[in-house]
Amino acid sequence: AWLGADPDGTPRLAADAAGRLTLARSVVSDLDVLRSLYYEATQGRGVDSRQVRGRLLTDALVLVRGPLLADRPEGRYRWLTHEIVDAQLPLLVADTGLALSEFHLERNRAEKAIEALNAALRTAPADERLWHELLRATHTTDDPDRLRALAADLVDRSGARGVPPRTEALLDELLPTWREGVAAAG
């Protein structure tokens, strides 16, 4: 009842002959919209228009609130871990966040870039590319305390396995004293 019916009266959610629930083609998911917006921004209308690209990428990232079905009850939707969408969503969100960050950094809007990257990190917290761009964008703010705090957070998140080599090299480049902060904290 919540999904309603199409204009011709066909229910948008129905059971097929085998009893499986099926959605009508008119039902669009946020994931479908996210994919479409990203595609339009990077390969469609946004290619030739900076303004359109920025709007589409922003609209796409607004749809993202965190990991896929993060609030699902324990033991529910276990089948989802076997679906490719569970792996694709974080990548798509990361790509969107990176594209929007680049869009903002082209105009020296570091705070907007940082905002986009943080939004993407809510869904893709393990994506090293997002962390690298967040370090770079934070570096452009010329706020060494903020960069040190981000580096410390990144080191804490790395846990026992340590900071990945590429991230370590980037920290060495952007904040050569970052290891002193780790030693002081340890």
Image (spheres, helix red, strand yellow):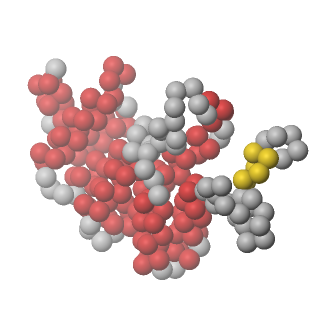
Q: Quadrant of the C terminus?
A: top left
In the rendered image, the residue lying farthest to the right is 17
Residue 61: image location, x then y, percent: 44, 59
Residue 4: image location, x then y, percent: 66, 61
In the figure, is residue 15 to the left or right of 70? right
Q: Is residue 120 above or below residue 111?
A: above
> Residue at coordinates 23% horizontally, 46% vertically from top-left?
174
Q: Is residue 129 visible?
A: no
> Residue at coordinates 36% horizontally, 57% vertically from top-left?
116
Q: Quadrant of the N terminus?
A: bottom right
In the figure, is residue 146 to the left or right of 121? left
In the rendered image, the residue lying farthest to the front is 1
> Residue at coordinates 47% horizontally, 38% vertically from top-left?
71
Name the quadrant containing residue 179: top left
Q: Is residue 53 above or below residue 78?
A: below
* Residue closer to the observer: 69 or 73: 73
In the figure, is residue 95 to the left or right of 7? left
Q: Is residue 38 above or below residue 22?
A: below
> Residue at coordinates 65% horizontally, 41% vertically from top-left?
84
Residue 97: image location, x then y, percent: 42, 56
* Residue closer to the observer: 179 or 84: 84
Q: Is residue 120 visible?
A: yes
* Residue closer to the observer: 69 or 107: 69
Count of residue discs: 0
Residue 18: image location, x then y, percent: 86, 40
Name the quadrant containing residue 26: bottom right
